[in-house]
Image (cartoon, grey):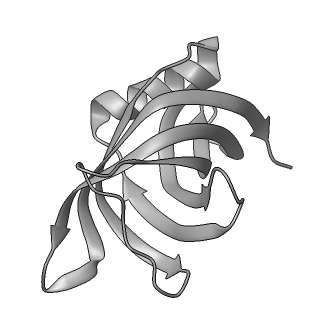
Amino acid sequence: MYTKIINPIIDIYDADTGEFEVTLAVELPHSQEDKLLNLLNRGELFSDLFIINAEVINARQGYEPPTVEHPRRRVGVLRLLARDDAGTDVPVEIRMTLTSQVRGVYPNDPSHLSSIEYTAILVDSVKRLV
């Protein structure tokens, strides 16, 4: 049984072309962490995910985040550590198709996205990485 999500990072790709868009280090509110734990522990799917305080780690040249007015279909590869009952951190990769919209960007710091909403999520795979 997994009890905690640690260091989530998501790579985002264009759903039509497969072109890399951005890598984000993200923070999950408790309710969103619970969604991921329920997926890992019980296979419960979810249709949306809300992320706060995302930091751009890497982005293609000219990357512009999708907006509320112009959401975009994307492929997301979420990598994280899932802590189990014994305190072991297990690397996990979750691949999903999603619609992305950034809800907050700091004008003075474009590498920090204050909130992102992923909707219409279809989980493609969940893999425990060895």
| Figure disc tally | 0
Above or below, 56 relative to 88:
below
Name the residue nearer the viewer: 31 or 112: 112
Image-based side of 120 in relation to 20, left or right:
left
Image-based side of 54 in relation to 81, left or right:
left
The picture places residue 49, in percent across and down from the top left corner, at 39, 35
Above or below, 111 relative to 25:
below
The picture places residue 70, in percent across and down from the top left corner, at 31, 52
Q: Quadrant of the N terminus?
A: top right
In which quarter of the view is residue 12 placed?
bottom right
Q: What residue is at 33 percent from the left and 49 percent from the top? A: 101
Name the residue nearer the viewer: 20 or 94: 20
Q: Is residue 97 visible?
A: yes
Image-based side of 114 in relation to 78, left or right:
left
The picture places residue 40, in percent across and down from the top left corner, at 62, 25
Q: What residue is at 38 percent from the left and 73 percent from the top? A: 64
In which quarter of the view is residue 65 placed?
bottom left
Q: Is residue 1 visible?
A: no
Above or below, 42 relative to 124:
above
In which quarter of the view is residue 29 placed?
top left
Q: What residue is at 61 percent from the left and 18 percent from the top? A: 41
The picture places residue 19, in percent across and down from the top left corner, at 68, 67
Residue reaching furthest left? Answer: 107
